[in-house]
Structure formats: C-alpha cells, structure tokens
Image: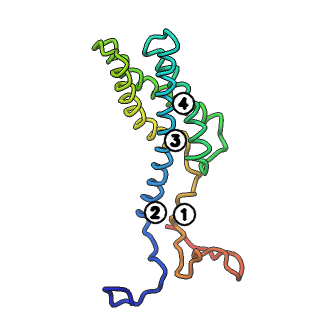
C-alpha cells in the first residue's frame, strides 16, 4: 500500500495526460533552444566585442557582423541538436525561412542598438553591450516563435501519434507490436 492512500501501489507511474505530455515536450524544446541560444549569445557578444576592439567598424556594423556569425552557429545548433527530430525533407525551404526570420531578428536586435547609439547617444562600450544584450533578448522571443512555427516544423502526425498511443500498465504501448503480431487497429479521435 502506498503511504497515505488506501489504494494498492502497482509500482508503475500513472499514465500522463495529453496536456502534460505537450508541456513536457515544450519544456524540453525550450531547454534545448535555450542551450543553443545561450551558446549563440556568447558567440554573438564575444565576436561583437572582438570586432569592436580589433577594427574601426562603427558599433552597429560590428554588431551586424557578430549577429551573422551567431546566426550560422545557431542554425547548426538548432538543426542538429534542438530540432534534429523535425522534418528534414525541405532543406532549401528550411534554410530560406531560417535566413528570412534571422534577418528580421537581426533588424530587431540591431535596431534597438542603433536607437540607443544614434538616437540617445549611448555609445560607451558598457552601454553598447547592455543594448546589444537587450536587443538579442527581444529578437530571441521572435526567433523562438518563428523557428518552431515555420522553420523546424514537426513531422506530420508525429505529435498526434505520440499523444494518441497511451502506455499500458505493463509498459508496452497499447496497439503496438506485441509478441503476437501486427498492431491492432484503433480509431484515433
């Protein structure tokens, strides 16, 4: 018997509900997106400060160079880590959409830095880094939404199939292949 309950314990966890599964998947995706994005943030800020120290490029141009380097880094991380289980059939379309949404993110990120630098005259290295960081943050919200919605799309039916096949008490998915043969036909609502 379980502690504090009158029900016998089966030892197996209760099956998760549909919403719980979706939240778990979204949570794992957000953590992976954050890991790649965090590394991309470091690349972006390191390249930005390196370009500012080594060249005479103006602040916003240095930021654009750093953002482009981070975009390449992030694409590789998203494609081969965060969204590696997503549809890979249309790489040309995926790359085109990624570049389009990344360009919008670049404008958001560097637009904020431009407004701070040339609109308000805040152009010390510390102020530039603060507004670069804030611009990256605002652009990241847009990028997360656009990448998961348009660029790295889920395989058709993969999410529905995962949610429609509940796990039986014995640990085997209902309707799946058992020792006896082919899966049983179940109607999915």
The residue identified by callout 2 is: 21
Q: Of 127 and 158, which appears nearest the observer? A: 127
Disc number for residue 71: 4
Q: In this view, does 154 lie above or below 146?
A: below
Image quadrant assignment for residue 179 = bottom right
Q: Say whether disc 2 or disc 4 marks the residue closer to the N-terminus.
A: 2
Q: Is residue 121 above or below residue 89?
A: above
Disc number for residue 180: none
Spatial separation of the CA atoms under disc 2 and disc 1: 9 Å
How far from the left and from the top, in percent, is residue 67? 50, 25
Q: Say whether disc 3 or disc 4 marks the residue closer to the N-terminus.
A: 3
How far from the left and from the top, in percent, is residue 103? 50, 25
Task: Tell me the mark number nearer the camera, choosing from 3 and 2.
Answer: 3
Disc number for residue 36: 3
Q: Of 146 and 141, which appears nearest the observer? A: 141
Disc number for residue 162: 1
Does the residue at mark 4 contact the one at mark 1 (Cβ under 8 Å)?
A: no
SS at mark 3?
helix
SS at mark 1?
helix
Does the residue at mark 3 contact the one at mark 2 (Cβ under 8 Å)?
A: no
Task: Tell me the mark number nearer the camera, choosing from 2 and 1.
Answer: 2
Task: Tell me the mark number nearer the camera, choosing from 1 and 3.
Answer: 3
């Amino acid at each position: 018997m379980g502690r504090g309950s009158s029900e016998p314990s089966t030892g197996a966890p209760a099956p998760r509900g549909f919403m719980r599964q979706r939240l778990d998947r979204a949570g794992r995706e957000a953590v992976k997106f954050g890991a790649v994005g965090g590394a991309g943030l470091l690349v972006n800020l390191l390249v930005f400060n390196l370009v500012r120290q080594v060249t005479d490029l103006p602040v916003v141009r240095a930021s654009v160079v750093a953002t482009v380097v981070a975009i390449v880094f992030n694409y590789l991380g998203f494609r081969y880590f965060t969204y590696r289980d997503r549809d890979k059939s249309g790489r040309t379309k995926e790359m085109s959409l990624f570049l389009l949404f990344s360009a919008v993110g670049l404008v958001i990120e560097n637009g904020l830095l431009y407004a701070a630098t040339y609109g308000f005259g805040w152009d010390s290295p510390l102020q530039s880094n603060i507004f670069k960081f804030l611009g990256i943050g605002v652009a990241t919200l847009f990028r997360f939404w656009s990448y998961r919605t348009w660029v790295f799309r889920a395989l058709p039916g993969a999410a529905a199939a995962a949610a429609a096949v509940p796990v039986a008490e014995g640990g085997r998915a209902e309707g799946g292949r058992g020792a006896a043969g082919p899966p049983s036909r179940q109607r999915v609502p």
